[in-house]
Image (spheres, rainbow, N blue to C red):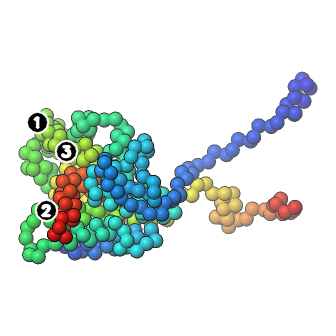
Amino acid sequence: MWRGCRRLLRAPLPPPPRPARGYAPPAERKRFYKRVGISRGEGGFEINLDQRKLRTPQAKLFAVPSEALAVAVAAEWDAQQDTIQLYAMHLTTLCNTALDNPTQRDKTQLIQAAVKFLETDTICYRVEEPATLVELQRNQWDPMIEWAEKRYNVTIGSSTSITGPTIPVSTRETFSSHLASYNMWALQGIEYVINQLKSFILSMGLIDRHITVEEAVLLSRLEEEYQIQRWGKVEWAHDFDLHELRARTAAGVLFTHLCLESSTVKHKLLQDSGPGR
Amino acid sequence: MAALGSPLATFRGLLRELRYVSACAGRLCRDMAVYRHVVQAFRAHRVTEEKLCRAQHELHFQAATYLCLLRSSRLHLALLRQHRGRGPRSAHDTARLVGLALPSRPGGDGRQA
């Protein structure tokens, strides 16, 4: 027994367990470049950080189809101060998602995922009490549903039950065939907007330029706004969420519109190089 | 159609946000590609008479969306900087929070030779 104790004494003591730390923010990369530029390559418009070309997380060359999108992405990289805050670079993130396609979904799956959101659309779920909120939801959300029903010639409706409204098969088919007319990049953007706003109808209103981003975000957060009016606002929770949701939604909408407009941008480039200018 | 306000207000708002961006980058606003792109787009699509023009509405919507993106990102990051957690407090900071101080060791804190 003594021998065992001596061995224990001679053996180096294991390091004391470190106290479990709470949340520690992840380290951010330093800004390693000075100038951000855009160049035109074979795959589209590329971003240059000094002499290096920007790459996606899967090490693919970062190339986007539209010049305006490349300009906006370059502005995001230019806006970084000492460290690169990737979590606040929504356009870059969206382009990375579209280029890498980390979930490995094809067009049909993307459309299915988008249309599936219609079954659990925020603006189709209504409350039964309090009466003021019921009225607010009716006044604010009903015009959007009416617009969508008229614009796409479908039936949607709303419900107060927990299972939500029953969406007819024809409605789903109409939306599926409408979404099929968009390209892969635009679809990634649309799905992103839907996931942010938690509403298919509001997203389509944005893509069709029926409402502005501020209006869509307000409609999406209608109940929260109602509670804020009643109970007061906390800056670091409510305002924080509001600005983040607005930034993300605006990024998704802008991304979708810019990806749909590559032909317009080409036309402008031709004009610029023409003899008239 | 979405209520966007006047294009001039959107343009001014965009220039204002871009000035914030260029201040972050430590450069002149004029040297940035995005500034040139915005000014050029607004100039190229300027119309002399008030007409209902779908393409113009599209461009204005895009500009307003970009303005919303820039402004909300700036405000979001400002709130984040102000309120973000900086990890757990040290024993010294926690003690100071309630007006106490950690006892000092008689022989210094051990760093002196």
Residue type at tag 1: Ser
Residue B62 lies, in percent from the top left, at 23, 61
Quadrant of the drawing holding the N terminus of chain A: top right
Nearer the observer: mark 3 or 1; the answer is 3
Left or right: B95, with A214 as reference point: right
What's the residue at 35%, 53% (across, down)? A46
Q: How far, Cα to Cα, is label 3 from label 1?
A: 20 Å
Q: Is mark 1 on a helix, strand or loop?
A: helix
Q: What element carries label 2?
A: helix
Residue A221 shows in the view: no
Which subunit holds the residue at mark 3? A
Residue type at tag 3: Tyr
Q: What element carries label 3?
A: loop
Q: Which residue is denoted by mark 3 in the rendering?
A: A182
Q: How far, Cα to Cα, is label 1 from label 2?
A: 32 Å
Q: Which residue is denoted by mark 2 in the rendering?
A: B55
